[in-house]
Structure formats: structure tokens, C-alpha cells
Amino acid sequence: MKNSNSIVYQGSPGSFSHLTALDHCSSYLILEGRKTFSEVFEALEKGEARYGIIPIENSLIGSIYENYDLLGKSSLSIIREIKRRIELSLITLPGVSIDQIKKVFSHPKALEQCRFFFKNILIFKL
């Protein structure tokens, strides 16, 4: 049986999906992160949670095709749209200037979202 007070999302605490759940679904007592989008769908289909939060579109990189594919293969439906402004930060050790940065490590989608910054500020190849 589905837990009526649970939401699954892809990511860990602090991820954009987790923050969206906190901001817009605060009445739900259980928020549980999963490693992959497919694990979110599996949890919903198995009845381990009542709702899931996944990104579908991104104004910088376009559609999140993996989630369209997963949605098309499942019996699940979209019941609500939530828009979220995504803000990313470049973090370094104290005293490191931007011209000293040689490599940036992050999630591939985050790097893709920052491609204009890297192209204009840093010598960086995605």
C-alpha cells in the first residue's frame, strides 16, 4: 500500500528535487531520495511512495528525455507542475582566484547548464 505521506525524488538531501519537495509539499512527512530517475519510477510503481518529483524540462538544456521515456513506459501520470529557478555556485578553497581553476567536477547536467559561463569565463571543454 502506498504511504499517503511520502514523496520520492532523484538525488540526495539538498538536491533541486528535494528542495522543491520541501518548498511545495511540506505537508508530506516522508521525503526519500533515490539514486536514479528509474528508481523513482520503480518506487512509485511498487507502491513504496505515493508521489514522485522529477524534472521534465530545463530552460537551458531542454527536455529531460530520460524522464519522458520513463513516463511513457509507465502507467504513472503527471498531476502537478512546479517551476523552480535553478541557481548553481562555483566553489573553491579560500584564496583561489577564478583564473587558477583548471578543472570543474560536477553532475553532467549542472556542467551543461553552466556551459555559457565556462565558455566565456574559463577555458573549459564539456
Image (tube, rainbow, N blue to C red):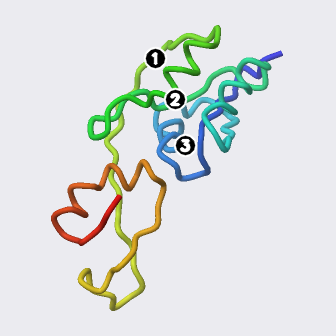
Q: Secondary structure at mark 2?
A: helix
Which circle marks residue 18 in the picture? Answer: 3
Q: Earlier in the sequence, mark 1 or mark 2?
A: 2
Callout 3: helix, strand or loop?
Answer: helix
Q: Position of residue 79 (x, y in %)?
A: 50, 12
Q: What residue sits right under mark 2 in the picture?
A: 66
Dot 1: within a 10 Å radius of its alpha carbon, few (fewer than 14), some, or many (20 or more) residues? few
- Residue 96 position, x and y percent, is 33, 88
Asked if residue 94 is positioned above or below residue 33 in the image, the reply reads: below
Q: Quadrant of the C terminus?
A: bottom left
Residue type at tag 2: Glu
For the residue marked with disc 1, what is the amino acid? Answer: Arg
Please state the horizontal and vertical placement of residue 58, each as a whole percent of the image.
34, 35
Asked if disc 1 and disc 3 are in contact, CB closer than 8 Å, the reply is no
In the image, is 84 to the left or to the right of 10? left
**Residue carrying label 1:** 80
